[in-house]
Image (cartoon, rainbow, N blue to C red):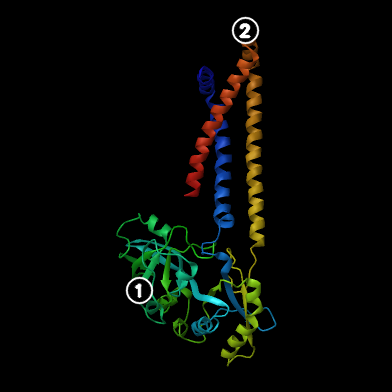
Amino acid sequence: MQDFKFAFRQLIKAPGFTAIAVLTLALAIGVNSAIFALINGVVLRPMAPVRPNEVVNVFNCRQNANHDYRQFSYNEFRDMRENNGEVFADLAALEFAVAGIGRDHEMRRSFAFLTSENYFSMMGVQPFRGRFYSAEECRPNANIPIVVASYGFWKRQGGRADFVGSTLQINRQPYTVIGISPERFCGASALIAPDVWIPLGMRAQLGSAFGDSESMRDLANPKNYTLNLVGRLRSALTIESAKSRMPVVSQRFSAMQTDIEFQREVQIQKPSRFSLSTSPEDDGPIALIGTLLMAMAGAVLLIACLNLANMLLARGTARSKEIALRLALGASRWRIVRQLLAEGLLLAICGGAVGLILSIWCNN
């Protein structure tokens, strides 16, 4: 204890050195913690769905060309959901938009997902509070103004107990909050965390958010190719086995295409956590970027430690006369080393504490 008291007094006597040393260590720890939190949340953490190995994204492209990808119409979605039970246990539709979301005069541009009624059940999640929307509320042009708020949005709004049942403004139109999604749930994508989920039946009202013409706001329009599809494979089916059955699914899909020049085929792929593209994407480059970020974070910490070591060596050199005098007065070498270690430990504790505060602030 006496060593720590002496070390504390020594650090107080050199406020400039102490402040720079603590700040150097704190910044290194804070940056590393923030980068790791980002990589953990985006790359390492498992996907939100229950049994994520069964979840696939569904695409369609020009037959035998592997290009000219497009989204699906609502009619195509309903037909595929009803007639491909040998491959999919369930099939859901979603579309994303950017809209003005808030309460009273506190509005901000944010992401919203429009989904079919079975999206949440297919993902295997239950509402944190309230309920999810029904098939009646998702039918084309139902125009029932309800939303499910994300857990994060609810917390940012104060986490009020009476939030379910309250009114939100979306593009200056009132919507009733019927439920709150589970914590950390953002669907199969880590790229976009929506503030609200809206039933597909409200698409006509939100058409302006997509820049659509009046005719293309109608979800029942067979030319309205706006939906992304995500499916859950049957429990006994691997993705390789499912791909082998895609020609049959493609035949059924092509049978619907009576007014186009080229026949189209259906493809499936594991969901990309970092893309909302209408064509298949690979997460490999993002994983590589995550590895590089971790390496850079480690390099930052190493440089900070080397700088701190150099500062301590320079301080030790400046105190050489003091140390020589203490040795001459009978202090043992172990006692001096112990006091120097106490100074280093105090710096590490202070730097770590400030770094922890910085990392919490960055993560928030």
Looking at the image, is 272 positioned above or below residue 69?
above
Q: CA distance from mark 2 to mark 1?
A: 83 Å
Which element type, helix, strand or loop, lies under badge 2? loop
Q: Going from the N terminus, do you reach mark 2 or mark 1 first?
A: 1
Q: Residue furthest front?
A: 236
Please identify the quarter of the rendering in which residue 276 is found: bottom right
- Residue 274 location in percent, x, y? 58, 63
Judged left or right of residue 326, residue 100 is: left
Tag 1: amino acid:
Pro
**Residue highlighted by disc 2:** 330
Looking at the image, is 192 positioned above or below residue 260?
above
Crowdedness near tag 2: few (<14), some (14–19) or many (≥20) residues, C-alpha within 10 Å:
few
- Residue 111 location in percent, x, y? 46, 65
Q: Nearer the viewer, mark 2 or mark 1?
A: 2
Q: Residue furthest right?
A: 64
- Residue 151 location in percent, x, y? 41, 59
Q: Residue furthest bottom?
A: 258
Residue at x 63%, y 16% (from the top left corner)? 334
Tag 2: amino acid:
Gly
Looking at the image, is 86 positioned above or below residue 54?
below
Please identify the quarter of the rendering in which residue 282 is found: bottom right
Which element type, helix, strand or loop, lies under badge 1? loop
Looking at the image, is 214 positioned above or below residue 42?
below
**Residue highlighted by disc 1:** 145
Number of marks present in the image shown: 2
Relative depth, front residue between 235 and 172:
235
